Amino acid sequence: MSMKLPSRSENFSDWYNQVVLKAELADYAPVRGCMVVRPYGWTLWENIQAALDRRFKETGHVNAAFPLLIPISFLEKEKDHVKGFSPELAVVTIGGGEKLEEPLIVRPTSETVIGSMYSKWIKSYRDLPVLINQWGNVVRWEMRTKLFLRTLEFYWQEGHTAHATSDEAQEETLKMLDVYTDFAVNEAAVPVVPGRKSEREKFAGAVDSYTIEAMMGDTRALQSATSHFLGQNFARAFDIQFLDWNNQMQYVWTTSWGLSTRFIGAIIMTHGDDQGLVLPPRLAPIQVVIIPIYRNDDERAVVMPVVDMVREAISDYRIHIDDRQEVTPGFKFNDWEMRGVPLRIEIGPKDVAKETLTLSRRDILGKTGKKQIPQKGLLSEVDKILIDIQSSLLDKAKQFREVNTHDPGDFAEFIEVVKNGWAFSWWCGDPECEARIKEETTATTRCIPQDQPTGNGRCIYCGNNATERVIFARAY
C-alpha cells in the first residue's frame, strides 16, 4: 500500500478515509455501514476508555452491563424518544427460527431498558443517587456512514443516573459535561466548547442537552460528547418512584451522558497532517518508537545493546522497537509518521560511537523536529519532549479555532463565514430563524456556550433582540 496521502487542503474527506485505513485504525466490515476496529485503533480506544473510566470512578460512578436487545414496547413508552430514534432502529422479529411475540430493538441507546431496571431497584430515598455507567456498543441504522464518525454500529460509554431532586440531576448533568471537557482538553489535546443544545437539536426525550463541540481541521464542527438532563420524563414512563423523607411517593430525576468512538475521529481531524496521524502522547498506543539502524551483523551487534539500554531507561512509556529487516529505515520513518507516534528514537553505529541518540518529534517534521542528545540524559529529555508535544498540540488547535471563529456583522457576511469557519453570533432563540439559517447555509446551532458575553444583541438572521450568542457551523 502506498504511503502517499491526499492533501488535507485539497480533499479533506479523502485524506481522512485514507489515514484511517493506512494507519490501520479501522477497516470496512462485510456489513455495509459497519467497521472493524483494528488493534492499533482499539488500543487508542482502550486508552480513551481508561482516561474516562478513571474520571467516572473518581466522581462516584460504577460500571454495569445491560442487554443489547430491548422490547419495542419500552421505546413506545416515551413518545419523544421513540419518535426521535424510529428512523434509525434495527428490529429483530425472528429468534430461534420462530416469530417473536414482541419485536426486539437492537439498542440505539439504553435509557428505556435501564429505566425499567431502576423501577425495580429504587424504592426509597436511601437508594439514591444511582450512578451507573455502561461500556458497550449500539446500533443506529445510518444511511450515510464514515469510519468512526458515523457508522451503523459503534462503541461508546453511556452513563445513566437517578436522583432525588431536580437540582441534583442538573448538577450531575453539568458535572459530567465538565468531565468530558477535562478529558478532551487534557488527555486528547482537543479544545472544545461546552454548551447547551437548542430545543431543535437536543436529545429525544431530554429537558436539556449539553455538548462539547470541537473544530476539525477543515473547520467543520464535531459533536464530541453529550450530557442530558432528562427531568422526570423517563421516570414517569417507567414508573421509577421512591418514598421520600416525608413518606411521600416521588418520581426520580434522571440523566444520561455519553462519548463514543467518534472521538477517535476528533483526534484524527484535529491533529493530523499530510503525513498522517499526529497523536497526543497521553493517548497514543505507542508513545516512543525506537528504530535501530544497521547494515550488517557487525553493526547490529553494536547497536542492539544500546537499543536495549534505551528501552530499559524509558520503560515507563509505551514503547515499540522496530527491528524489521525487510524494509529500509526511511520506510520505517514514514510508517511511524503515518501512525502518529509522538516520538522516534534513531540509533545507528555513529550514535553508539558518539554516545548520542537522535530524537525526532512527530508534531514538527524535518530537521526542525530533530535533535541529538547524550545517552545519559535520555529519560529527562523524553519526559520534557512528550509534555511539550502534548501542550503544543493543544495550543496549535486552539489557535486554529480562534483564527477560524468569526463575529459576522450581518447575515450576508454570516453566509460567507460558515462556508469555511464558525460564526459566534447573537440568536433570538426562535426555531424559525434557526430552521431558515440551516436551509440557507447548511450551518446549524452547534451549541449555546456556557461562557456568554454580558448584555444583549441583535439576532444575526431576523434582527430581533437576542440574549445569547451561539456557535453556528457546518458539522459532521
Image: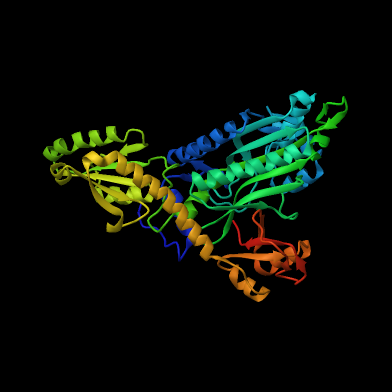
Rendering coords of residue 368 (x, y %): 29, 58
Q: Give the position of the C terminus as an image quadrant.
A: bottom right
Relative placement, left or right, of 359 versus 155 is left
Rendering coords of residue 251 (x, y %): 83, 33
Residue at image x 61%, y 69%? 407
Relative placement, left or right, of 318 versus 11 is left
Residues 217 and 379: in front is: 379
Q: Is residue 435 visible?
A: no
Q: Quadrant of residue 474?
A: bottom right
Q: Residue furthest front?
A: 454
Q: Is residue 386 visible?
A: yes
Rendering coords of residue 446 (x, y %): 65, 57
Rendering coords of residue 202 (x, y %): 72, 51
The answer to whether 143 is drawn above or below residue 378 in the figure is below
The answer to whether 82 is drawn above or below residue 252 in the figure is below
Residue at image x 61%, y 33%? 59
